[in-house]
Amino acid sequence: MEPSEIVVGLDIGTTKIVVIVGRRNEFGKIEILGMGKSESFGVARGVVQNIDQTVQSIQTAVAEAEAKSGVDIKVVNVGIAGQHIRSMQHRGIKTRASIEQEISQNDIDSLIDDMYKLMMAPGEEIIHVLPQEYIIDNESGIKNPIGMSGIRLEANFHIITGQIAAARNIYKCVQKSGLEVSELTLEPLASADAVLSNEEKEAGVVLVDIGGGTTDVAIFQDGIIRHTAVIPFGGNVITEDVKEGCTIIKSQAELLKIKFGSALASENQENEIVSIPGLRGRAHKEISVRNLSAIIQARMEEIVEHVYYEIKHSGYEKKLIAGIVVTGGGAQLKHVSQLIEYITGMDTRVGYPNEHLAKGSEDVTSPLFATSVGLVMKGLQTLDKQNKKMVSTADVKGGIKGHSKERTTGFFDKLKSFFDEDASQK
């Protein structure tokens, strides 16, 4: 197996911006060539709120990734999140012309393309159309209909929508950073690729990605995505609570949370005390670690209750054999899996994005990088699909070179045409 082309994942988070350069090696594992990370300014709860600050942060992370990998970064796979994300179920129907012809990938593509034409609320647009199962001439439960015969082809779809303004701002930030967007991916889907196994997706599992500004939820069962949601709370809210509760500055609150924080106050001794330097010659402040954990636990319980509501709302609560996998920066909090197990009664583990990584990629094995590793994986999957399509066409000449880009339907075509018109008017 030849090493694949190079793909770049760009995770524009609330607390950090991460750029990861990777490719698939000859053993099918993902080899990380370089990683750049910068503090995120201008993003709140997963949504861009200051273009210039976000552009500066992206450029800093890209420069670091380029220096480490020796790759000139031009095209990136970007994640999207935020509380504006919605999901819905819909059924699509296509009547085929002939029963003699086998169902092909083109039939499925045209069915998916039709879904992008659904009417949405003003300001909203479809980001992803994910097939769940197919029905051929009333025969249901078909996962892959290619090669089968039938006149009436139907499919149940999981459709993810978002605000076009939020996506446009992401696109604008990337463009102003001198880069081009290859694909826009919902962040929990990227994280799921990085930390979940196929067995877990088959058995039924909930992915909970606790980021700085949002907590992303994705539910899989029978290997199919069943439910997605974005909860507008994350690690930053916990830091704010610690800052208020302990009357200290934000940077000290963040350090306290990371070094001494726990999601279960009962796991700390009564007499554990942390001393914090006072401001400008003022006296040191002493904080009880148990009190600190009590503040953190109260907010974590609220986040987990929101997650549990989404699990119950999905209707799959009793079918999730593999339980919950928690990832993201918030998964590094001590005793977080025990708290989630206590509230939901479901088995919980912390998800690390190291299963798919080649040796020598230790820099990105923290749950913190689950989304960015997942974005690289999504980019590689897209490249594989394109290459298969290019090989299957009759006029293949001289092999495949360069980073070609797949046609993106609906949502992204509109964004591209908007910026093309904008550029021509200038």
Image (tube, rainbow, N blue to C red):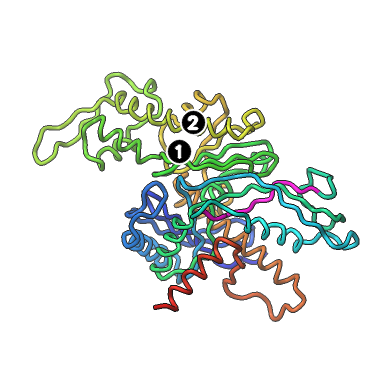
Q: Amino acid type of disc 2?
A: Ser
Residue 134 coordinates in the image, percent (x, y): 76, 48
Q: Secondary structure at mark 1?
A: helix
Q: Residue at x 35, y 59 (%)?
A: 54
Q: Is residue 41 left or right of residue 223?
A: left
Give the residue pinned by disc 1.
331
Q: Secondary structure at mark 2?
A: helix
Residue 225 coordinates in the image, percent (x, y): 64, 44
Give the residue furthest to the bottom.
397
Instruction: Kindly tell me whether residue 71 is visible in this rendering.
Output: no
Extent of the magenta region: 124-135
Give the residue pinned by disc 2.
337
Could you tell me how far apart the alpha carbons at marks 2 and 1 are, in whole angstroms? Answer: 8 Å
* Label 2 close to label 1 by CB (< 8 Å): yes
425 part of magenta stretch: no
Q: Residues within 10 Å of mark 1 (few under 14, many from 20)?
A: many
Q: Nearer the viewer, residue 128 or 12?
A: 128
129 part of magenta stretch: yes
